[in-house]
């Protein structure tokens, strides 16, 4: 089998964080979401991975960050999608890379509990033409939705229905054999002007191909919005190990599952896990609360922060009120001004400079 990762898109729902950074490279628990997807595919035994990217600066960032895949022991091939014409279009332009192999398609900004190894083994040993992953959601009108009959066979798939007949949303993980190319060539663009993957799967169903639904009961998160990014960060942090590779002085307190990466320094501070402190980051006279990720080369001094993500080379100094539920981009500086608020909630793009009143 082969892997196909879709890594295009502007990430506009994460603005301003993604004005200058590809959304798939925003880290969850100090590891870019895209890297987690690559690892999930590799851990399922797949070593040949295609990555669909756009033709903008975000694509350049992804190409540079991933390279040839050797750091994961895989081979990567980049496939340029010149216009964002839908998921089925991404499959269509990847036919040369995929050939007649079975493949798994994984959206590059999705995080799923438990990985995909069992799904890959199940599909690889089956006679199914496709397997799709579904999960119950509270607001199915925002997703592609599958309707099953009483025998749990797929009857209908609809993209973002106004009146959903089911609460089973399509997770961003799909498995196909070569018959999917008949499907993507046999459908027409939707009202959005895109070739929808739901229409392609519906084509397979209507033409008597075997499409197997798998209902995932664990958590799954599309990290497209700030609140979802924070939720994914919390979920992944809840599974980390307690690892101390950096320096913690005798005046500091570490509680719960905390990872302190190489070169990091914790000075006269309190860290309450689950939390992760990145390489060469300094935490001085500060409190880092649960579900917080501080990335590499940051400084947190005389401040409190929890349930937040701070990206690399950022400085938060002298903030007396606790920062919470926040996303802070790269090279950000947050410093104290004379009038102090009681609480702060921030979503800051790269290279931001703000004064707190």
Image (cartoon, rainbow, N blue to C red):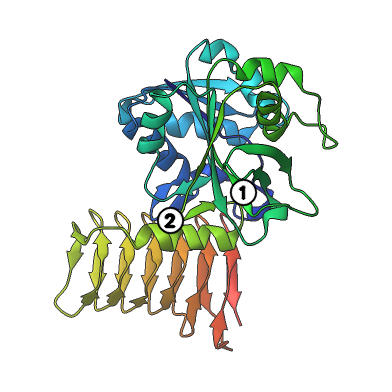
Mark number displayed over residue 154 = none
How much space separates mark 1 and mark 2, taking CA atoms? 38 Å
SS assignment at label 2 = loop
- 335 sits left or right of 259 in the view: right
- Above or below residue 99? Residue 344 is below
Q: Which residue does the image show at 85% across and 36% down from the upper left?
A: 191
Farthest residue in the left direction?
A: 250
Q: Nearer the viewer, mark 1 or mark 2?
A: 1
Q: Quadrant of residue 132?
A: top right
Q: Quadrant of residue 148?
A: top right
Name the spot of residue 133 as percent of width and height, x first: 53, 41
- Above or below residue 213? Residue 182 is above
Image quadrant containing the N terminus: top left
Point out the tag, 1 or 2, that comes first from the N-terminus. Answer: 1
Q: Which residue does the image show at 36% across and 23% down from the upper left?
A: 47
Farthest residue in the front direction?
A: 150
Image quadrant containing the C terminus: bottom right
Whether residue 332 appears in this view of the structure is no
Name the spot of residue 180 as percent of width and height, x first: 61, 20
Nearer the observer, 310 or 134: 134
Q: Quadrant of residue 355?
A: bottom right
Q: Exactly how many numbered labels are in the figure?
A: 2
SS assignment at label 1 = strand
- Above or below residue 315? Residue 185 is above
In the rendered image, which residue does mark 1 sit on?
Answer: 169
Residues packed near mark 1 inside 10 Å, few (<14), some (14 to 19) or many (20 plus): many
Name the spot of residue 68 as percent of width and height, x first: 40, 22
In the rendered image, which residue does mark 2 sit on?
Answer: 313
Farthest residue in the right direction?
A: 191
- 253 sits left or right of 235 in the view: left
Whether residue 26 appears in this view of the structure is yes
Q: Which residue does the image show at 46% across and 54% down from the upper left?
A: 217
């Amino acid at each position: 089998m082969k892997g196909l990762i879709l890594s295009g898109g502007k990430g506009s729902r994460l603005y301003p964080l993604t004005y200058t950074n590809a959304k798939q490279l925003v880290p969850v628990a100090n590891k870019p979401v895209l890297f987690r997807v690559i690892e999930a595919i590799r851990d399922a035994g797949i070593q040949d991975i295609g990555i669909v990217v756009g033709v903008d600066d975000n694509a350049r960032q992804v190409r540079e960050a991933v390279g040839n895949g050797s750091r994961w022991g895989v081979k990567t091939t980049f496939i340029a999608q010149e216009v964002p014409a839908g998921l089925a279009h991404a499959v269509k332009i990847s036919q040369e890379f995929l050939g007649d192999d079975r493949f798994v398609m994984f959206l590059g900004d999705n995080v799923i509990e438990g990985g995909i190894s069992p799904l890959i083994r199940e599909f690889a040993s089956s006679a199914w033409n496709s397997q799709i992953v579904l999960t119950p959601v509270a607001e199915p009108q925002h997703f592609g939705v599958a309707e099953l009959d009483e025998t749990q066979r797929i009857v209908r798939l609809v993209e973002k229905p106004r009146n959903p007949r089911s609460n089973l949303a399509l997770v961003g993980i799909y498995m196909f054999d070569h018959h999917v190319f008949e499907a993507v060539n046999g459908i027409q663009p939707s009202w959005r002007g895109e070739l929808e993957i739901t229409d392609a799967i519906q084509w397979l169903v209507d033409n008597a191909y075997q499409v197997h639904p798998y209902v995932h009961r664990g958590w799954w998160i599309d990290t497209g919005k700030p609140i979802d990014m924070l939720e994914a960060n919390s979920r992944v942090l809840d599974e980390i190990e307690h690892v101390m590779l950096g320096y913690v002085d005798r005046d500091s307190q570490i509680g719960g599952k905390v990872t302190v990466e190489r070169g990091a320094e914790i000075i006269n501070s309190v860290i309450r896990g689950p939390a992760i402190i990145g390489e060469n980051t300094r935490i001085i006279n500060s409190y880092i609360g649960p579900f917080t990720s501080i990335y590499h080369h940051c400084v947190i001094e005389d401040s409190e922060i929890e349930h937040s993500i701070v990206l690399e080379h950022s400085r938060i100094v002298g903030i007396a009120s606790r920062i919470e539920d926040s996303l802070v981009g790269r090279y950000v500086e947050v410093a104290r001004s004379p009038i102090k608020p009681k609480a702060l909630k921030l979503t800051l793009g790269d290279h931001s400079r703000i004064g707190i009143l």
